[in-house]
Amino acid sequence: MPETIFYSLQVIKINKSNSFQNRVLALSNKRIYNIKSENIFTQIFSKKKFDIRNSIKLGDLQKIVYSNESEQFILCSNSYDLLIESEE
């Protein structure tokens, strides 16, 4: 079965040093992708349209932890955890 992206959204990734990085989170039928988000001019004029920083296989996703008090959630997998902030 070919891979299909079902949903994507602009998010902020919070890294280990508490820095904020603009990202696109994309959900496919096989993986969740963490894609580096550039400004609109880079997306238009760059030959490389997107930069996948890493991804989590859906089978490796152990849990999603979300906060009732903020817009943050954590994607927990076998290999690493991803702290995300989103208004959606």
Image: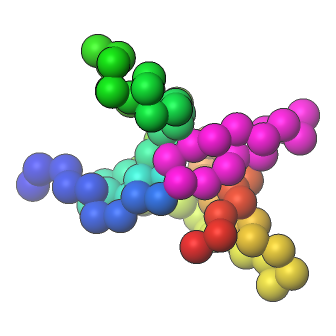
Q: Where residue 81 appears, x then y in whole percent?
A: 69, 49
Q: Inspect the magenta stretch and tell me whether residue 31 lies in it.
A: no
At 68% from the left edge and 50% from the top edge, which residue is drawn?
12
Residue 49: give x, y in percent of width and height. 33, 27
Q: Is the magenta stretch mostly helix, strand or loop?
A: strand
Identify which residue, 70 or 3, lies in the foreground: 70
Left or right: residue 5 versus residue 87 is: left
Q: Look at 71% across and 66% down and name the residue there.
A: 73
Q: Where is residue 45 in the image (x, y as percent from the top left)?
A: 33, 18
**Occupied quadrant, residue 84:** bottom right
Residue 81 in view = no
Of residues 78 and 87, which is closer to you in this image? 87
Q: Looking at the image, is 88 positioned above or below residue 59?
A: below
Q: Specify start and end residues of the magenta stretch as a single range.
A: 10-24
Which quadrant of the view contains residue 58?
A: bottom left
**In which image quadrant can residue 70 be found?**
bottom right
Which quadrant would the N terminus be assigned to in this image?
A: bottom left
64 sits left or right of 33 in the view: right
**Rendering colour mode:** rainbow
